[in-house]
Image (tube, rainbow, N blue to C red):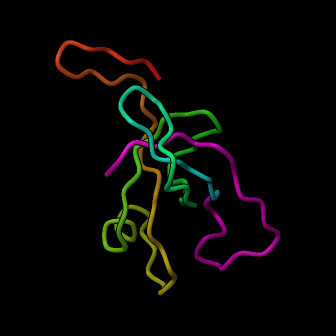
Protein backbone atom coordinates (compact mmCIF):
# COMPACT_ATOMS: atom_id res chain seq x y z
CA UNK A 1 0.00 0.00 0.00
CA UNK A 2 1.11 3.54 -0.61
CA UNK A 3 -0.07 7.14 -0.26
CA UNK A 4 -1.19 9.04 -3.35
CA UNK A 5 -2.92 12.26 -4.29
CA UNK A 6 -5.85 12.11 -6.73
CA UNK A 7 -4.86 14.45 -9.58
CA UNK A 8 -7.61 13.69 -12.09
CA UNK A 9 -10.17 11.26 -13.38
CA UNK A 10 -10.57 9.14 -16.47
CA UNK A 11 -13.75 9.63 -18.48
CA UNK A 12 -14.73 6.94 -20.93
CA UNK A 13 -17.93 6.05 -22.69
CA UNK A 14 -16.96 2.39 -23.01
CA UNK A 15 -15.52 0.16 -20.28
CA UNK A 16 -15.12 -3.53 -19.74
CA UNK A 17 -18.27 -4.78 -17.94
CA UNK A 18 -16.27 -5.55 -14.78
CA UNK A 19 -15.24 -1.89 -14.44
CA UNK A 20 -18.60 -0.27 -15.18
CA UNK A 21 -19.61 0.46 -11.60
CA UNK A 22 -16.21 1.86 -10.58
CA UNK A 23 -14.76 5.29 -11.44
CA UNK A 24 -11.18 5.43 -12.68
CA UNK A 25 -8.88 8.01 -11.06
CA UNK A 26 -5.46 9.36 -11.94
CA UNK A 27 -3.29 9.17 -8.84
CA UNK A 28 0.27 10.19 -8.08
CA UNK A 29 2.42 8.89 -5.21
CA UNK A 30 3.29 11.41 -2.48
CA UNK A 31 5.53 11.57 0.53
CA UNK A 32 4.00 11.80 4.01
CA UNK A 33 4.01 15.61 3.78
CA UNK A 34 1.79 15.46 0.67
CA UNK A 35 4.48 16.44 -1.82
CA UNK A 36 3.98 14.77 -5.19
CA UNK A 37 6.79 12.48 -6.30
CA UNK A 38 8.27 13.17 -9.73
CA UNK A 39 7.35 9.82 -11.26
CA UNK A 40 4.67 7.23 -10.91
CA UNK A 41 1.37 8.65 -12.19
CA UNK A 42 -1.11 5.80 -12.61
CA UNK A 43 -4.75 4.95 -13.12
CA UNK A 44 -6.52 3.39 -10.14
CA UNK A 45 -9.97 1.91 -9.74
CA UNK A 46 -11.89 3.86 -7.10
CA UNK A 47 -13.59 1.56 -4.59
CA UNK A 48 -14.65 4.25 -2.11
CA UNK A 49 -15.66 7.52 -3.78
CA UNK A 50 -12.50 9.63 -3.63
CA UNK A 51 -12.24 12.95 -5.43
CA UNK A 52 -9.63 15.13 -7.09
CA UNK A 53 -7.30 16.60 -4.47
CA UNK A 54 -7.84 13.83 -1.90
CA UNK A 55 -4.97 12.01 -0.26
CA UNK A 56 -5.73 8.32 -0.70
CA UNK A 57 -4.43 4.92 0.28
CA UNK A 58 -3.80 2.74 -2.78
CA UNK A 59 -3.30 -1.01 -2.81
CA UNK A 60 -1.32 -2.51 -5.66
CA UNK A 61 -1.47 -6.03 -6.93
CA UNK A 62 -4.08 -8.18 -8.60
CA UNK A 63 -4.88 -10.57 -5.75
CA UNK A 64 -5.73 -7.96 -3.13
CA UNK A 65 -7.47 -5.78 -5.70
CA UNK A 66 -9.79 -8.55 -6.84
CA UNK A 67 -10.69 -9.39 -3.23
CA UNK A 68 -11.46 -5.76 -2.35
CA UNK A 69 -13.66 -5.17 -5.39
CA UNK A 70 -15.15 -8.66 -5.44
CA UNK A 71 -14.46 -8.97 -9.16
CA UNK A 72 -14.48 -12.50 -10.51
CA UNK A 73 -13.86 -11.92 -14.21
CA UNK A 74 -10.36 -11.97 -15.62
CA UNK A 75 -9.62 -8.30 -16.32
CA UNK A 76 -6.32 -6.50 -15.84
CA UNK A 77 -6.38 -4.85 -12.44
CA UNK A 78 -3.51 -3.44 -10.45
CA UNK A 79 -4.14 -0.28 -8.38
CA UNK A 80 -7.26 0.26 -6.27
CA UNK A 81 -8.08 3.25 -4.06
CA UNK A 82 -9.14 1.74 -0.71
CA UNK A 83 -9.21 4.74 1.64
CA UNK A 84 -9.29 8.52 1.91
CA UNK A 85 -6.66 9.85 4.32
CA UNK A 86 -7.67 12.58 6.76
CA UNK A 87 -4.42 12.84 8.70
CA UNK A 88 -0.99 11.22 8.93
CA UNK A 89 0.77 11.12 12.27
CA UNK A 90 4.41 10.02 12.47
CA UNK A 91 6.73 10.42 15.47
CA UNK A 92 4.86 13.40 16.86
CA UNK A 93 4.54 15.05 13.47
CA UNK A 94 1.02 15.65 12.19
CA UNK A 95 0.11 16.24 8.54
CA UNK A 96 -3.47 17.02 7.54
CA UNK A 97 -4.73 16.03 4.14
Q: Residue furthest left?
A: 91
- The residue at 35%/48% (across/down) is 2
Is residue 5 one of those drawn in magenta? yes
- The residue at 31%/66% (across/down) is 64
Q: Is residue 36 above or below residue 94?
A: below
The image quarter containing residue 31 is top left
Q: Residue furthest right?
A: 13
Residue 65 in percent (x, y) is at 39, 66
Q: Residue furthest bottom?
A: 74
Left or right of 20: which side holds 81? Answer: left
Left or right of 93: which side holds 80? Answer: right
The span picked out in magenta is: 1-22
Is residue 2 one of those drawn in magenta? yes
16 and 8: which is toward the camera: 8
The image quarter containing residue 15 is bottom right
Residue 9 in percent (x, y) is at 69, 51
Residue 24 in percent (x, y) is at 63, 59
Q: Is residue 68 above or below residue 97?
A: below
- The residue at 48%/32% (across/down) is 35
Residue 49 in percent (x, y) is at 58, 44
Q: Residue furthest front?
A: 38
The image quarter containing residue 50 is top right
- The residue at 31%/52% (across/down) is 1
Amino acid sequence: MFICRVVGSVVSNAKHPCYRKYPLLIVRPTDTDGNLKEKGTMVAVDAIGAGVGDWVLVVSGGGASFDILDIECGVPLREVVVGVIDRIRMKGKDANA
